Image (cartoon, grey):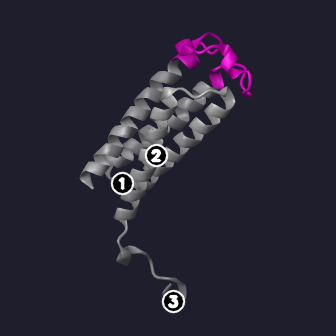
Amino acid sequence: MKTVRWTGIALLFFLAASSIIGSIPMLADPHGSPWSMQQSLLQHSPFPSYLVPGILLLLLNGLLALWALWLALDQAPRYGLWMALQGCVLLGWLIAECLMIRLVVWPHYLYGAIAIGLISIGVLLWRDEYQPGDLPAAPFGENI
């Protein structure tokens, strides 16, 4: 499980760093062309500029990934659950983005693989954290 944990940590680090770096131009110049993305990409979205997507990118995939990374490095209880949650957030982000911009490009596949990796690794780590005898007893002494 050590290799699995460190793989998850590497994925979280990459996601956090690339999301924070990617959000900076969107926040600095939301009406310009950050990362050579044309304003016309937003025509089917509810956003008039890249400001709100930049804020959401920073919070949901940057800072949340940093939080999950910190928990994983600290081996805090349920850090695998946070890792899986971050993978779900990233997958939801990708689906929403592709639907809004009506375009799928190679980074979507890369980050999709990262999302699936985080979900899988997180579930494995979370499941490994609890052994059969660790779960609380059923109420009223009933065994399920």
Q: Is residue 35 left or right of residue 129?
A: right
Residue under label 1: 76
- Please name the amino acid that badge 2 sits on: Ile
Residue 142, numbered label: 3
Q: Earlier in the sequence, mark 3 or mark 1?
A: 1
Asked if residue 62 can be seen in this view, the reply is no
Determine contact: label 2, label 3, CB under 8 Å. Answer: no
C-alpha distance separating marks 3 and 1: 30 Å
Instruction: Inspect the magenta stretch and tell me whether residue 113 lies in it.
Output: no
Q: Position of residue 81 (x, y in %)?
A: 45, 55
Residue under the image location 39 percent in, 39 percent down: 12
Residue at left offset 72%, top offset 27%: 45
* SS of the residue under disc 3: loop
**Of the pair 90 and 60, the residue shown nearer to us:** 90
User: For the residue labelled by badge 2, is the local secondary structure a helix, a strand or a loop?
Assistant: helix
Amino acid of disc 3: Glu
Q: Which residue is mark 2?
A: 116
Count of residue discs:
3
Q: Position of residue 68 (x, y in %)?
A: 42, 45
Using a 10 Å C-alpha cutoff, classify the residue at mark 3 as few (fewer than 14 neighbours), some (14 to 19) or many (20 or more). Answer: few
- Is residue 47 in view? yes
Q: Is residue 73 above or below residue 28?
A: below
Amino acid carrying mark 1 in the image: Ala
- Element type at marker 1? loop
Q: Quadrant of the N terminus?
A: bottom left
